[in-house]
Amino acid sequence: MVSSNVVRSRLQHLSSVGAGLIEGISCVEASMVGTYAYVFSHDGITLLWAVLLPFLFWPFIEVGSSYVGARSHRRFLDLMQAESGPAAASVAGFSLLVSGVSAMVVEVIAASIALSYAVGVGWIFLVPAVLSILFFVPTVSGKHWELLTLLGSVPMLAFPAVAYLRLSSQPSLLSGALSGLFTPKLSGARAEDVAAILGATVAPDALFFSEEAGAEGRVGEGGIGLGHALALVMAISLAVAFSSSGVALSQNSLRGIGTSLVPILGSYAYPVFSIGLFSSCISAFAVALRPWLSSLAYLTDNAPAKEEEFLLPTMVLVGGIVFFVGLLGNWVSSVFFLATYDSGIASAAGLIFPLALISKYVVSKKDVPFSVRLFLPIYAGVLLFFCAYGLICGL
């Protein structure tokens, strides 16, 4: 007979694996889908190495963030203030606010467009209803958004099937994918494309998720490894699927993305993709909202318990930005691609300073693995290089 201690130990192990698994799968949401579609449908698979790059560093980011949470049991920005001073913590807070609000705007636009395909109404008219749904779900579901994340990701599993079908039937595409994956080169692409890919793949939300999980003892190395492996497969599959669907995606429509799933799902491709995208928007919005509220509470000297007081002002702010972006884009669905691309760049830039502060904190801690102390600052430098280089080239 299995003792209760053994059962409890196994449940704790499953919980730790599940935390890393959820974080890995949850990266496949509107920001990644839109950014990858925008970049790879134009540049092909020459930038596949930029997809692989963040996955090489992501485990070290999560281990470092988990260490911070497990040792401090304090809010991230509170700890950064104690270690680096209030000015540095405030800069980190503002950078997280910018990346956070850009992520929420993308999720609202994507969810509105996905819903518009189902009801046959212009997406801009659905924004108020979508805002209500996205803000309401986190307040009633709490930490149970993990289930929404998993459910929302299920339709996205069709992309690996599409990628496998195309790679197996096109030997030249397979050789090109291997070359693009392991031969880093820009080859005429823009540096900001790389920054957008990096930001869409590993967003600042990962810092907060990992710190919270570390504080609660919910992250294990097995969970991180499994989550990253699945997320890497999904990310490469998205890039391959979009790179060979340039004609459809050149229409700059979410329906074009659904078209890439037709070889697997047939006529069900469009409703299945719309449902999957809408579901993933709900969970991704909940993930982005938490660090936003935490940063806002810190910058306004409010206790964590008062974070919900910022929900209504945040709803108004996000809604106003969405309408402004829609106005600039003439209310067409192509605004989704531009919004996700810019959000990816904002996420990459917003991760630089907080990551640098975490690096400063863990680099002197001898009980942190040397690889974590080495690669955290390196990845911060990588992000800084591509963001700065892209900015300079764009001037």
Image: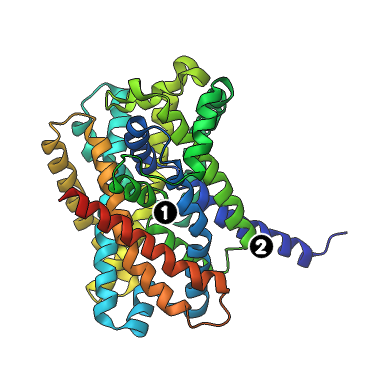
- Callout 1: helix, strand or loop? loop
The residue carrying mark 2 is 12
Q: Quadrant of the N terminus?
A: bottom right
| Kind of residue sitting beneath label 2 | Gln
Residue 308 at least partly seen: no
Does residue 13 appear to the left or right of 182 in the view shown?
Answer: right
> Which residue is drawn at the image coordinates 39% and 42% (left, top)?
32
- The earlier-in-sequence mark between 2 and 1 is 2
* Residue 329: percent from left, percent from top: 15, 34
The residue carrying mark 1 is 202
Which of label 2 and label 1 is nearer to you?
A: 1
Q: Residues within 10 Å of mark 2 (few under 14, many from 20)?
A: some
Between the residue at mark 2 and the residue at mark 1, the CA separation in whole angstroms equals 26 Å
Does residue 381 appear to the left or right of 2 in the view shown?
Answer: left
Q: Are marks 2 and 1 in contact (CB under 8 Å)?
A: no
* Residue 344: percent from left, percent from top: 31, 48
* Residue 313: percent from left, percent from top: 19, 57
Does residue 120 appear to the left or right of 362 in the view shown?
Answer: left
Q: In the rendered view, tell whether residue 123 sits above or below residue 94.
A: above
* Residue 37: percent from left, percent from top: 36, 34
